[in-house]
Amino acid sequence: MVFAKRIIFLSVLLVLSACGRVKEPSGLAPADRERLKMLGNPHPRLLVTVESQEKLKSAIQSSHQWLWERFLQDLPEDLASAEKPLPGELDRGVADLAPRLCFAWLITGDPAHLQAAKSHLLKLAQSQPWDPENDLIHGHLLQGIALAYDWLYPVLSQEERALVAGRLGQEAESEYQRMTTGRVWYHNQYFQNHGISNFCGLSYASAALWGENDSAWKWLENCEKFMAKVYETLPKDGTSLEGLSYGAYDFEYILRFAELSKSLLGRDYYDTPGLKEMPAWYLHSLVPAPTEAEWAVTFGDAPRHSNWHGPEPQLFLAAAKYRDPQAQWLARFLINLRESGLASASFWAILWYDPEVEPADPATFPTFHHFTENDQVMMRSSWTDPQAMLVGLKCGPFMGKTYSKTAEWDWGTNHQDPDAGSFQICAYGQYLAIDPLYTSFKRTSNHNTVLIKGQGQLGGDVQWMGVAECLEFKHYPEILYADSIPAGEFEKNGREMFAAAYDYVVGDVTRAYHPALGLKKFLRHYLFIKPDILIVADDIELDSAGVLCTFASNELEVSGGLDHSREGYVVGKEGEAYTLFNGKPGKYKITANYLDNFPGAGSYSLAVDGKTIHSWKTDSPETDNILIVSPEVELAHGSRISFLGTELPHNFRLIKMTAFSTEVTSDPTVEWLLHVDPLAEVNKNSGRFEASLGEAVLEVFPVIGRVLPPSEKWERFPILRPHERIRETNRLVVPAKVDNSKAMNVVLLRARGKSEPGINRISANGDNGLINLSWEIKDKKTAFDWDLQNRKIEFK
């Protein structure tokens, strides 16, 4: 009987022990389990330990002193911010401030720094509920509070620990529920900063509360699943499909998760190719004459920098992990562009700087780089001349070459632009051929590419890149050829000749456009003859059959309860959005692109002149971004095209409608576009167009394919919903001659200093893809034959 009681008692102990045991993510090796047990050890344990803290204190007296001095330059402003009450609506700034204050105390031990850090942390722990609609603050707050809690843990009272841990656990569980049962829109957006930052933030909360909160294991497991997919799908060429600035945001949190995961879980994500190649993307985006505010050529939603999110810590960490001297050089260079401080690099730069990696010599950097996943090319005349010419171009599919053809939903690429085939030029210290930077209304007409039949590319004429349309109609522009040829001497007809160095790129832009436009071929050839000539040759085949009519949401009429939001979307619980068709009569299909994250909730239909042609309910299990294509319907001039909905969910937004036909004919027009700075002085003189900015001049010569009589013109072009200073541009429109469904348009661009002589005696002719070009600059003649089909250049 006594033995039986002992057995029962032991069993109860085992059950209680099992119930109290902290669960852990699946798939852990024994060594990883042992490492996880260390999470029960005393704090601090996230990124900084007692041992590493002492090493940092020593380093700031020697190898890291230059960074520490800059950190101290930012500290007074941080301390002043900590004294202020929290804003009515929490933002990312108050979240990021918490670990900065804590780091100052960790290194200095100053009681004033401790008081500021603790006070700010406790204010965050007692703040109002976090706005569920402002989801970007969640990842920052979770990470910021987690780091502050971990780093201050030894000096917090039991009551303070309970307060912070309770609030952190509450918000972590709320975020977990949003990601799982709540179907938050970014739960499967592996390319998107919202998903990456929020999952990373939740992982830090999990690690900070491990051993204290029984839910930490499921939070961490959820984060591991998402982030593993991020590393798996990360573009292998080191780029981000969100552009340079949001890319820095992505890499910021991707690397923070990698460091947390390696130190606490034993996971090593540093064999991910995209992490190793990332520094090259930032390096080759660097302009020849950079400033703190403008140091990069960027595509997509970005200013001319990525200062909001480093990128110096990311570069330092890559330099340390991969022993990359170019990354080390660039990180130091970008920090030294600032007069003082570290700004967003902050303590992360101090944590991740490895002084044993020697910076590279810029004179050794390659002047040409092709990023093969995003199909972006950067080519320059020199790395050491501040007057050098840099040409950047982009011609890749919206989700990268690996996933665009097979993806079933978009993974978060809305920060792109419909700009395939576009290029930018920097030279003589100025941005000469420009991009309008960050906009929240996407138009191909904003970029240095081509309009076909007056229409832009797939994904355009919407508030953010219309990725559902790109998926439906197989958006897939790509670079077919990219090479850099050094200068050389050769003999011809007994004479010693010299061939200039040149870079040659060919992009196939055809599948960037809607298939209904009848565009059969659009190959864009870029020939960069160093040091200062770019020639763009477009080889186009275009049928007259095919037409596309686009109806942006802000242009639609609304009734019956629907309305327009501040951003221009059609929103509401029920009603009609419509337009009166003013195109050519014929048979068309109609599309509607809208957002709905509640499958089965709303009822939708499309109608023409009051007659329903298609009705449905949203049933997509994976995405809230829906595109519907109707059956074919007859449209007449004045037909009323209607989108109708009832019982629509609260997040419903109608983005765009179109009508397209592959049979109705339209004029086969081609318009070549070039944008220059609104402050540039522009003029036209006998077929030569010029744009002057500062001490730089861009000469533009449409040499082959001009419409006669010539109708090229400069115009002031408005940028819709801009985020940057560029509210309008000086835009040059060059109509191209289309003959027998074919167009060959060739434009020569040259950058020069204001005091330098211009091009004279330019001569050009071409037919069937064979081009002969020559020009003179100050009695020096350049001439060559160009075979577009065989991609062959022969200098004369």
Image: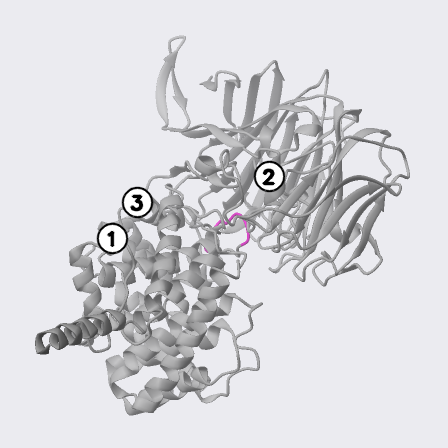
Res. 336 visible in picture:
no
In x, y percent, where is residue 588?
78, 31
Q: Quadrant of the N terminus?
A: bottom left
Q: How is the image coloured?
A: one colour
Q: CA distance from mark 3 to mark 2?
A: 41 Å
As helix, strand or loop, the secondary structure at mark 3 comes to helix
Of 416 and 173, which appears nearest the observer? Answer: 173
User: Which tag is nearer the camera, tag 3 or tag 1?
Assistant: 1
Of 717 and 46, which appears nearest the observer? Answer: 46
Tag 2 near tag 1, CB within 8 Å? no
Horizontal side of residue 60 vs 533, given as left or right: left
Horizontal side of residue 476 vs 320, given as left or right: right
Of 394 and 3, which appears nearest the observer? Answer: 3
Tag 3 near tag 2, CB within 8 Å? no
Q: Local crowd at mark 3 within 10 Å, few (<14), some, or many (≥20)?
A: few
Residues shaded magenta: 295-301
Q: Amino acid at mark 1?
A: Asp
In x, y percent, where is residue 305?
47, 57
Number of the label disc, if any, that sits on residue 470:
2
Q: Amino acid at mark 2?
A: Cys
Residue identified by numbered label 3: 363
Res 82 → quadrant: bottom left
